[in-house]
């Protein structure tokens, strides 16, 4: 099973993704802006078999988000399951 895992609270999401990797294949999507505000080194804790994918996002009112999230939505067709840990207004 292939899962698109969208991180929310990064500390919790990393631990959950590491636990799930034993049972499935995971692509871990994270917002680069959010991670840089926290601690980027937390991504080093992710299991090496998890594919990390950065999402470019802007401030909530920025309409460039439409293009960014729309192109991402097209890619989601190849996944069996989409796990969203946190709701982003543009992703919804």
Image: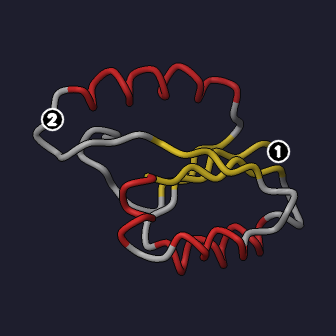
Tell how many labels. 2
Q: Give the labeled residue for mark 1.
A: 1
- Kindly identify the residue that appears in the image at 52 percent across and 19 percent down: 74
User: In the displayed structure, does residue 31 sit left or right of residue 77?
Assistant: left
**Image quadrant where residue 79 sits:** top right
> Horizontal and vertical percent for residue 12?
54, 79
Residue 6, how many percent across, how many down? 52, 53
Q: Residue 62 carries which label?
A: 2
Is disc 2 surrounded by few (<14), some (14 to 19) or many (20+) residues within 10 Å?
Answer: few
- Compared with 36, 32 (above or below) is above
**Which mark is in front, 2 or 1?**
2
Q: Judge from the rendering whether residue 90 lies leftward or rightward of residue 8; answer left or right.
A: left
Please tell me in which quadrant of the rendered image residue 86 appears: bottom left
Query: Residue at 73% of width from left, 69% of height from top?
Result: 46
Q: Quadrant of the N terminus?
A: top right
Question: In 3D space, how far apart are the residues under numbered discs 2 and 1 (Cα atoms)?
Answer: 34 Å
Quadrant assignment for the C terminus = top left
Q: What element carries label 2?
A: loop
In the image, what residue occupies the spot 69% across and 67% down? Answer: 17
**Which residue is drawn at the image coordinates 50% and 72% (left, top)?**
10
**Residue 38 position (above or below residue 6):** below
Q: Is residue 47 left or right of residue 81?
A: right
Residue 44 at what x, y percent from top left?
71, 71
Label ID, residue 27 = none
Given residues 2 and 52, the one toward you in this image is 52
């Amino acid at each position: 099973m292939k899962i698109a895992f969208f991180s929310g609270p990064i500390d919790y999401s990393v631990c959950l993704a590491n636990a799930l990797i034993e049972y499935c294949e995971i692509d871990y999507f994270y917002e680069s802006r959010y991670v840089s505000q926290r601690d980027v080194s937390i991504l080093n804790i992710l299991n090496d078999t998890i594919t990390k994918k950065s999402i470019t996002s802007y401030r909530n009112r920025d309409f460039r988000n439409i293009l960014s999230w729309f192109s991402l939505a097209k890619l989601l067709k190849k996944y069996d399951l989409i796990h969203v840990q946190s709701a982003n207004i543009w992703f919804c």
